[in-house]
Amino acid sequence: ELQDDFIDLLTMYPGTWIEQKYGSLAIHFRGLPALAAANFRLDATQRLSGFDELKFRFVTQTIEIAPVGGWDRGTAVRAILDHHNTGSGNQAIPIYCGDAENDREGMAVANSNGGLAIGIGAEVPYVAHSYLNHPDELAHHLEHLIGRLDATAARTQVAPVTAEPTIDAVGAKRGVMLLDRDPAFRATMGRELGQRGWTIWPADSIENARQTMHHHEDSIGAAIVDLQLPGLQGARALNELAKSQPSVFRCATTDNVDEHALAAFRKLNRMPLFAKPVAGSEIDHVLRQHASKS
């Protein structure tokens, strides 16, 4: 009935057409000039107002029409969650990405189920948690999110049955020199490793690292070095440590490096390399395992 009612209107506005969707209709008018598009919106609104059982909204240059209480992107997300969350195991966490007003219901359902709504572009609804300017940013944003989730999981994972060797039991030097360009990382990692019994000596440059190693060489047994310090300072610091203090256990950190490059580095070097974001528990595990073998 609705399509029949709109046939004459579409004929009056060449460049408009109806798209049949699952449980809804979409009337497109993106081919109209600005003035004709404005007139079409007025005429379409007048006709649609006569159907009390329907809801409609304008999304960019499209009119989306659906039954009141009918299927929308929110019910689609809810159906997917109901399908996956039927067992007693881990519950699925929805991540919804959208770029227009018709994503509002999907984002709302994702938010209400402990998920994340990501909006892309200038026309996203206010219910989005994160906002991106362009779709090209989405892959990087999701990689960053996955890294944060992995780090959180590592910090909260259940301890293995075989306990980590204690620092005292292996007679390890408690001192760790932490050379990194990021003050937030130095503070966070210093706190996390400090809570696990290590004494952290932070440094933000190769010059400070040299002074730290000179003043505390009797207590420092390991060094964690940022490979991406400006001017290849990280690589130089690791090389200097290998020559001047070969007994110091060396680790490296890096970020924005793909998995192939990480795998190649780890294959060619016996030195542990941690990709940021990294949990303190992960570095602590490697330090303890090395200390227990020393």
Image: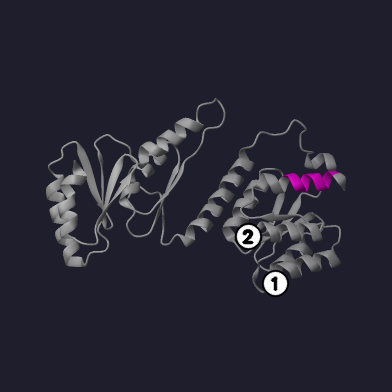
Give the residue pinned by disc 2: 255
Magenta highlight: main SS? helix
Q: Quadrant of the N terminus?
A: top left
**Range shown magenta:** 285-292
Dot placed on the residue nearer the N-terminal end, 2 or 1: 1
- Quadrant of the rendered structure where residue 177 is? bottom right
Q: What amino acid is found at the position of numbered circle 2 in the picture? A: Asp
Q: What amino acid is found at the position of numbered circle 1 in the picture? A: Leu
Q: Position of residue 197 (x, y in %)?
A: 71, 44
Closest to the observer, 105 or 289: 105
Q: Is residue 110 visible?
A: yes
- Counting every numbered tag in the picture gives 2
Q: Is residue 37 left or right of residue 242?
A: left
- Residue beneath the point at 56% across and 53% down: 143
The local secondary structure at tag 2 comes to: loop
Q: Is residue 90 left or right of residue 190?
A: left
Closest to the observer, 133 or 166: 133
- Residue beneath the point at 28% across and 49% down: 26
The answer to whether marks 2 and 1 mark residues whose Cβ atoms lie closer than 8 Å is no
- Residue beneath the point at 76% across and 54% down: 272
C-alpha separation, residue under disc 2 versus residue under disc 1: 14 Å
Give the residue pinned by disc 1: 232
Q: Is residue 11 left or right of residue 120?
A: left
Q: Position of residue 135 (x, y in %)?
A: 45, 59
Q: Is residue 291 magenta?
A: yes
- Residue beneath the point at 61% across and 61% down: 256
Q: Is residue 244 magenta?
A: no
- Quadrant of the rendered structure where residue 228 is? bottom right
Q: Characterize the local packing of mark 1: few (<14), some (14-19) or many (20 or more) Cα atoms within 10 angstroms.
A: few
- Quadrant of the rendered structure where residue 267 is? bottom right
Closest to the observer, 272 or 94: 94
